[in-house]
Amino acid sequence: MDFIKLERVGNMTVLTLNRPDCLNAWHTAMRAEIMQVLREAATDPAVGALVMTGAGDRAFCAGQDLNEARDFDGARAETWIGEWETYYHLLRSFPKPLVMALNGTAAGSAFQVALLGDIRVAHEGVKMGQPEINAGIASVTGPWIMREMLGLSRTIELTLTGRMMTARECHQLGLIHHLVAPEEVRARALAIAAELAAKPPVALRLDKQRFQEMTEAGFRDAMKAAARLHHESYESGEPARMMQAFFAEREQRRHAAR
């Protein structure tokens, strides 16, 4: 594995997103590695639960690596959404406990992936949100997930402002289940994963299956809409212009810091 690290702790697998130099932002190759682990862990009787976290202390994951998406056109954006549909389906259908150990920022698609886990553990420094509008990118799958958990009013506010929520706000809203000290995130996540892995496995699998069934129609509708709206978004050229401005501003900050 080039972009993730795997560790076995008892009957639990710890999957660490391992691109700390870019805040663990993911690209196609990284997601392919994660999907391989999900497929294998789902059928491996030696794996009782999976914990996902990020390398370093700055970010769980900054979301999509913009270097990969900066030159997309409408057709590539549609294909790209199909890749995300496969990834999200594997997370949603994972039959074993999936615990997110959040050790920093979870933005955009990383926020969505965090919400697709069963239990979320975080510390005060964590920030989560859906800032895609600030990059000129239409937000479709994120609002679907948020509406399921928060209702439409808060989903509209978070989507249109693109603001990042503090860990305290996320905890109050129920998006973060356990708020602990930074040095305790991993241990608490492992303890919760071990507790869930000790539950009757058939009952747990069937409970998770039913949660997936309850939301499946909405999920597929969101992905279909995402393909359509991302095609229009990227064809407009707006994401490319916003990302170009982002990279130019970042380069200016780097020169100023020298």
Image: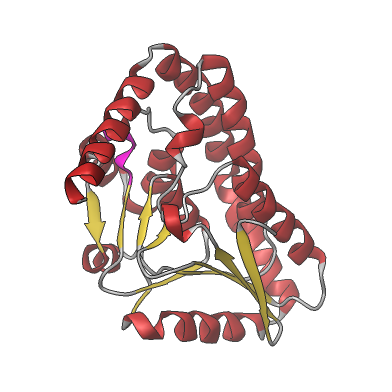
Choose top left, top right, bottom left or bottom right for residue 46: bottom right
Considering only vertical position in the picture, is 42 above or below 245? below
Choose top left, top right, bottom left or bottom right for residue 3: bottom right
Q: Position of residue 54 (x, y in %)?
A: 48, 65
Point 59% across, 35% down: residue: 220
Q: Position of residue 75 (x, y in %)?
A: 57, 16
Task: Out of 105 and 162, give the one closest to the viewer.
Answer: 105
Point 66% across, 86% down: residue: 198
Q: Position of residue 115 (x, y in %)?
A: 45, 56
Considering only vertical position in the picture, is 200 above or below 248? below
Considering only vertical position in the picture, is 173 above or below 140? below
Main secondary-structure element of the magenta-colored stretch? helix
Point 37% across, 84% down: residue: 183
Q: Is residue 222 magenta?
A: no
In this image, 227 relative to 39: left or right?
A: left
Q: Residue furthest top?
A: 236
Q: Position of residue 255 (x, y in %)?
A: 22, 43
Task: Out of 143 and 71, give the one closest to the viewer.
Answer: 71
In this image, 204 relative to 168: left or right?
A: right
Magenta span covers which residues?
130-134
